[in-house]
Amino acid sequence: MACYLTTGKHMSIYTSVFTVLLLLAITAPVALAFGFGGATAARSPLAPLRWFGKSYIAIVRGVPDIAFFLFFVIALDQGIEYLRHKALCRDWSEPIRQGNDFVVCQAAKMPLGDAPQWVHESYGFALAVLTFAIVFGAFAANVLFGAMRAVPRAQLETAEAYGMSPRQTFWRVLVPQMWVYALPGLSNLWMVLIKATPLLFLLGVEDIVYWARELGGTKTSRFTDYPHGDWRMWYFLALLVFYLIFTRISEIVLDRVMQRLTRGQATAGGEAQRKALA
Amino acid sequence: MSCLETIQAYGLRAVGIGERLLPREDFTLCQQFTLIGSGMIWNIYFGLVALTFGFFLATALAVGKASPNRMLRKPAEWFIFIFRGSPLFIQFFFGYFLFLSLKGVHPFFDAFTAAWLGALIVLFLNTAAYSGEIFYGALLSIPKGDTEAADAYGMTGWPRFRRVIWPTMLRLAWPAYTNEAIFLFHATALVFFSGFPAWQQRGDALYYANYFADKTFNPFVPYPILAMYFIILTLIVVGIFGMVNARLNRHLPQNVQKKLRIRPNLIR
Amino acid sequence: MKKLILTTAAVALTAGMALADGHAKTVRMGTEGAYPPYNFINDAGEVDGFERELGDELCARAELTCEWVTNEWDSIIPNLVSGNYDTIIAGMSITDERDEVIDFTQNYTLPDPSAYLVLSADVDLAGGVIAAQTNTIQAAFIANTGATLVEFATPEETIAAVKNGEADAVLADKAFLTPIAADDPDLMFLEQEELIGGGIGMGLRESDGELRGKFDAAIQSMKDDGSLNALLTKWEIGGAF
């Protein structure tokens, strides 16, 4: 039994747990940055920028993440290689699209053809992070857009009355105050993000679900030392427990953050904290 | 085959009406639009029915979770926690597995392994849990004045809930509930992708998009078509929910609502 | 959104510039890793199977440095033409449809018949329920007959469907079903078999004629000295050249 659980394949599933956690840890701030950019663009006084922000939110939110993942990574990869090709191989005469093939010069390949496997894997991982960030950035943008509107008007008027410029009002008054309104939406998004990780295998990253399916599937005695029947149920049960525990921890942490953010805010929660202290 | 004939042959293919064989050559844009659109019938069916039934269970769950009675609160809490805490993909797997075992026990469960019922039940429970949590949050933030006013009028029990608490809860929960509805429609794409088997090539939109991507080896046509259909569906959902929202808020002073709309242009 | 992609591309660009035009290129071999005996992931977590041995031998003969990559079956061709790896060596039958999009080397197995795996021999193939993996040549074949086709996302589920009575039979490549039937006393083959696919070949980009030539020659040399037949026998894949 101990031998079975420590085969190279099982080591892969343990590693993939860290892959998933790492992805979540990187994606969350990047998606938040995308969301912040999207929300700021959507409320920009400049019309084209506003349209761009609004259509980014509307389009990406409108498409199921799964459909997006099925073609977007390849498109992203080709886009990057196309740009590198344009920049690096100006004297290339052959067309880039040869029938169905997408051909760029060797120097434009991402990563380079002779790069070791781990570079390819990290590149694939980076693409997955970017794709996740673009999708969840749109949802985050929607939440932040709402949060910016929720900051009481009086707060901004006071800032103006103190002679702050619009830029100062935005950074010193609006942004610090919006988080408390954004947090419930953002924490909900975080929960959705956790549960979107099983889609990672669509992006070419071998995640826990991929390995659980691979390990749990029926194994015949010819190809392994540990033949067994359909054990997917047990592996999925383990995954279920993993996700439940992870959700629980997230809930506890986010509750703490909410407590912390509410401090000194002009909301009912903040008022209650003040009263409790007084 | 002209485009009109294609629509006649494949427009209802997803529910088994029309041509028996899927197209195996040409793969024209018309064919792709028609078949993927035909698959949307299933996405809309799953989304609509799960949402409708889920709404009632969600209300019950929210009231249960907010209840002071432990016997009511604990089951509601656990139900919401388990369905919100695990990926839908795993829920489909266990749902299918459970229905298969039940089928062995009694023939009554025969229909449950088919997507139209089995997947619907999983989606129904899933959306009920998510909406239940949203409604619960709204229940907690009902202004104290509202309930006090109800008490002052001498309302108790069912009338108090039906005429004061429930409408206010809905009004507060509505924006988040709109998001949940969008997520649910998106989630319907997972049914045939990793959950339930497709019988006689009757599948949802993603199933057909996948079919074309597999036949043409070109993911850049069918998936964007699928995306376009979903964007339209999302816009319709947002539109309908927006209308309901306006109705829920109709008693509020008009200038309060207008002010909300203009605000983003004033700041910055 | 376009703008965001641009900036990331620019970052990647400066990072990669220094490395441009390195030494001899590594050939990346794309496989699925879920289709024994052709290719699968062994206990150590590495690609293994008939095609692993074959591919390593071919690379040695063609004097190429090779590297193994796994990819989902669904997107295995789009990723090849997009250049994420250079060959597909994944039990892929040579079909006209595929040949229009990519190029194949000569076949390295003879056409493998598809077989029906059942619980009892009296299955009605014409009117019964037959399981197959979504988007396989077997699924397309059953859609054509009068039988009721039921499609599952993975091969694992098709077998499970027969065992639990959801389907009367499963149609799949015989070499894939054989070890499963050998391990499970409940399952058996039907006499009837279907010849659907052509032989299996290596898939390459159409623009990659040179690489195709090298692998073609290597396969030919393995056919000539009988080492290919030895491999086929070792992994119990039917038919010798």
Image (tube, coloured by chain):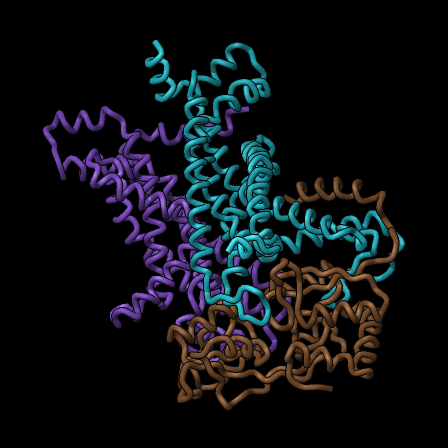
Chain colours: A cyan, B purple, C brown
Could you tell me which residue is drawn at 19 percent across and 36 percent down? B69
Is C151 situated left or right of B112 in this image?
right
Residue A194 as seen in the image, left or right of residue B116: right
Residue B169 point in image, percent of width and height: 28, 36
- Name the image quarter holding residue B64: top left
| Residue C157 in the image, given as x and y percentages of width and height | 47, 68
* Nearer the observer, A74 or A98: A74
- Residue B125: horizontal and vertical position, in percent? 32, 52
Place residue A103 in its image quadrant. Answer: bottom right
Viewer-proximal residue among B202 and B81: B81
Q: Residue furthest left?
A: B154
Q: Is residue A79 something that shows in the picture?
A: yes
Q: Position of residue C128 (x, y in %)?
A: 40, 84
- Which residue does the image show at 78% across and 51% down from the upper left? A115
- Give the quarter of the figure containing the C terminus of chain A: top left
Q: Is residue C120 above or below residue C34?
A: below
**Is residue A72 at all visible to an observer of this figure?**
no
**Residue at point 39% right, 48% down?**
B181
A40 on left or right of C165: right
B256, A24: nearer the viewer: A24
Q: Which residue is most to the front?
A: A2
Position of residue B134 relative to residue A265, above or below, is below
Compared to B252, does C64 lie above or below? Answer: below
